Amino acid sequence: MTTTRKMHLVAYLRTNSTASYAGGWRHPSAPLADVWSPERYQSLARLLETARFDAGFFADNLALPDLYKGRIDDYIGRGGQASLLDPMIALPIMAAATSHLGLGATLSTTFNDPYHLARSLGSLDLISGGRAAWNVVTSTMDAEARNFGMAAMPDKGSRYERADDVLEACTKLWDSWEPGALVMDRESGVFADPSRIHAANHRGPHVATAGPLGIPRSPQGRPVLMQAGASDRGRAFAARWAELVFASPATKEAGIGFRADLHERLRAAGRGPDSCKVLTSMSIVLGETEQIARDRAAYLEALVDPELVLASNSSLMGVDLHETLKQPAPAEVGNQGVQGTLDRMTATAAARKTSFAETVRRPRDLFVGTPGQIADTMEDWFTSGACDGFVLPPTVYPGTFEDAARLLVPELQKRGLFRRDYAGRTLRDNLRNPG
């Protein structure tokens, strides 16, 4: 097994033509009408696997954000990041078109019960041959809570307590089938060995489940666990459970600090630092020349709708930016806010020497340049200890991934920073051995 450290690459996806860059859906190369076409997801999966990405995961939420101006109009009306299809429908389609690519779903511990989660994710893990990942979220929006009969979101502490309880129950359910429990021996007539199938018997403070799970153990035992919480409680949760952490630091220095803090927490939890990979989000615009890349970025910026930016940032921070553009205190972010977004906005304003009001009016920073220039930045962050790899969202779908496969990945491979082929069959295998 190789010991050479290499980057991990994961694609950030949505079941929509919108992406993380406001206005990207308006680009003439972005298809709009194929969201419900199986071929969209098959083609995407083949592209990512050809480029040797570790995985693609679908971000998701369970409501249309309505915090900005107290309505959904600007967010959905101007093309915010909504999910127009349940990602759990798309992922098996992608599994059928690939053999190595990891496949991630975002599912909430606040609104789902352990048995349903364990069964759905375990089924995806089985049908993909051990390539499933679960991006564990506790959800953030009151609009989501109302869709599940609640007046508002529970406080963050309670949500994470329930999340711990749900994960404990899910792991017991996944472990309720030992390896070899499914026999399927025609000659002896033994279909399964009941002595290797056990009850879960989980009864925690928030959830309970008897088990055993009704489906057998997958080739990798259980799905890979992803997480993106940046708050102190979120980091504690990651140190206990996560194998992949999706981070969004505004600067390399912030990334170094985040990863170092997580490593300390992992050690305190009895885990090695290498047991959890930190992947930094990076929005890129590539060009065969620097001028081509800059022209592409300028065109993208011309498509940005400022009201959509404010509506999106309102949803992420839990603050109606139509009512105030002042920087909120951490306590003001409240139960609906994402701590990582406030941290990133604060750091970005400081790095740019701009006001908070100016910062929240602008979309995410783009990393713009030739394959060599983008690879230089990625190599710098990677070798400096800011991350173990990158989450790449599409500034334009699917062009960003096509450019990454054609231009960026070969440059990273030439530098010995990224795999030329998959070393393992399961997602967990490939995270442990990057090739």
Image (tube, rainbow, N blue to C red):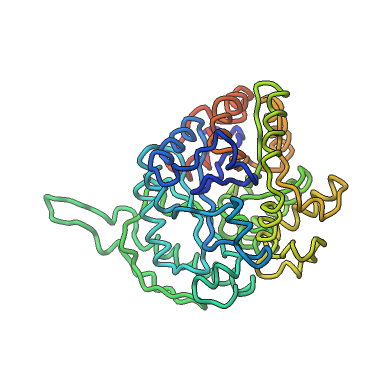
Could you say which is closer to the camera, residue 318 or residue 245? 318
Q: Is residue 123 left or right of residue 328?
A: left
Q: Is residue 359 left or right of residue 275?
A: right
Residue 359 in sight from this viewpoint: yes
Above or below for 265 versus 51: below
The residue positioned farthest toward the right in the image shown: 353
* Residue under the image location 67 percent in, 37 percent down: 300
The residue positioned farthest toward the left in the image shown: 187
What is the x, y in percent for residue 274? Answer: 61, 46
Residue 239 in sight from this viewpoint: no
* Residue under the image location 54 percent in, 30 percent down: 402
Could you say which is closer to the camera, residue 394 or residue 378? 394
Q: Is residue 374 left or right of residue 81?
A: right
Q: How many marks?
A: 0
Q: Is residue 150 left or right of residue 87?
A: right
In which image quadrant can residue 394 be found?
Answer: top right
What is the x, y in percent for residue 410? Answer: 58, 24
Above or below for 16 versus 7: below
* Residue under the image location 39 percent in, 38 percent down: 39
Above or below for 283 versus 174: above
What is the x, y in percent for residue 134? Answer: 49, 54
What is the x, y in percent for residue 114? Answer: 44, 67
